[in-house]
Amino acid sequence: MPVYSLKDLIIYFLKLGTWGFGGPVALVGYMHRDLVSNKKWISEDDYKEGLALSQLAPGPLAAQLSIYLGFVHYRLLGATLVGIAFVLPSFFMVLAIGYAYVSYGGLPWMQAVFYGVGAAVIGIIAMSSYKLTLKSIGNDKLLWVIFIALAVTTFITEEEILWVILLAGVAVWFAKAPPRWMASGANGIFPIMFLQLQPIATESKLWEIAWFFTKAGAFVFGSGLAIVPFLYGGVVKEYEWLNEQQFLDAVAVAMITPGPVVITVGFIGYLVAGVPGACVAALATFLPCYLFTVIPAPYFKKYGKNPAIKAFVDGVTAAAIGAIAGAVLVLGKRTLTDLPTVLIALTTIAILFRFKKLQEPLIIAVAALIGITLKLLL
């Protein structure tokens, strides 16, 4: 029997979703510190298995780990309620910010705030891309080739091409673990089935939002920032729901709110179709994440170390990180249009490189003040 109740776990994740700043790496660190080391509610082995599954399957890392930890002792009910508790606080925050943004976005002071914030966000994403690249790719030449190819492709086309990312996964799988597993049934963990689906034929914007964000949630591997190039390609280029500045503002909102970075989809959904759009976008994004956690969870001990699965995920991760790098270049080209914005972005990179534990919300706040000051002086 667990030494804690489901209510205890739900309250913990409500608090973490409310105060947990620092991105996915920090959030999974808090979970280990609090639930494994301090409270001893979760065993080290259960935590490691949850972290491995969260890294292997598509979906935002911290949200998936929270769902898995809820599943450990309280199965589907625990996974469902813990996942909701973790995401809900930041979702309400982005709704409030979305309301203020729509209501006051045309005012000079609001434009000045995001003038500085947008440039800082470019620096933050660039630094995150650098860290992800070093951590995930290392000295693997094949993964470097994939990374460079996707960075160049994303920069040229200004969109994330899903079939290329999946092809990268297949290429690494064929190179590192020739496909002997086909008869084992382990391929059920892959999200390739989503490619067989066709969007529902409807003129309703909510259905368009649901279909697009379902795909987004199904193909985000590792860091929540991996969703940025995919969202840019769909929200800005394909559907033209937002312009470039609004999209950068949406990424900034994700940086200044606690909880999973992917919660920016709620802000985007609000800008596109109000509260219903926010709810549909968030639900569609997190539903694949939830399913890719609870469905394989009982079988993960058996299939989790399968070389084919690991090789496929390595390839997809390298491709996704390359796409992030390409997206940074695209967004930077369009956002850093004068000397002050270039200086803000470069200063952000330098500060994050020098002070590795500095929290992004602090940088965002300072950038907002700089933006207001510059707009008042210019």
Image (cartoon, rainbow, N blue to C red):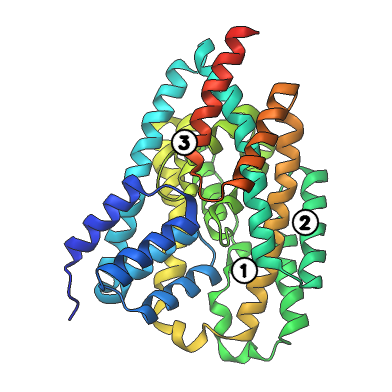
- Quadrant of residue 342 in the image? top right
Residue 117 visible, this angle = yes
The label nearer to you, 1 versus 3, is: 3
Residue 138 in which image quadrant: bottom right
Q: Position of residue 160 (x, y in %)?
A: 71, 50
Comes first in the chain, label 1 or label 2: 2
The image quadrant that residue 74 belongs to is bottom left
* Callout 2: SS: helix
The reply to whether the C-beta atoms of the residues labelled 1 and 3 are less than 8 Å apart is: no
Name the residue rendered at 46%, 82% in the picture. Answer: 300
> Gap between marks 1 and 3, in whole Å?
28 Å
- Residue 147's place in the image compared with 279, above or below, is below
Q: Amino acid at mark 1?
A: Ile
Q: Residue furthest front?
A: 354
Frontmost of labels 1 and 2 is 2
Task: Identify the residue under disc 2.
Answer: 150
Mark 1 or mark 3: which comes first in sequence? Answer: 1
Q: CA distance from mark 3 to mark 2?
A: 27 Å
**Residue visible at 75% across and 22% down?**
339
Quickly name the residue at label 1.
192
User: Considering depth in this image, is 191 or 338 the residue closer to the camera?
Assistant: 338
Which badge, 3 or 2, comes first in the chain's sequence? 2
Residue tagged 3: 267
Vertical comparison of 179 with 197: above or below: below
Using the image, tell me which numbered label, if any, was put on residue 311. none
Name the secondary structure under disc 3: helix
Residue type pointed to by label 2: Leu
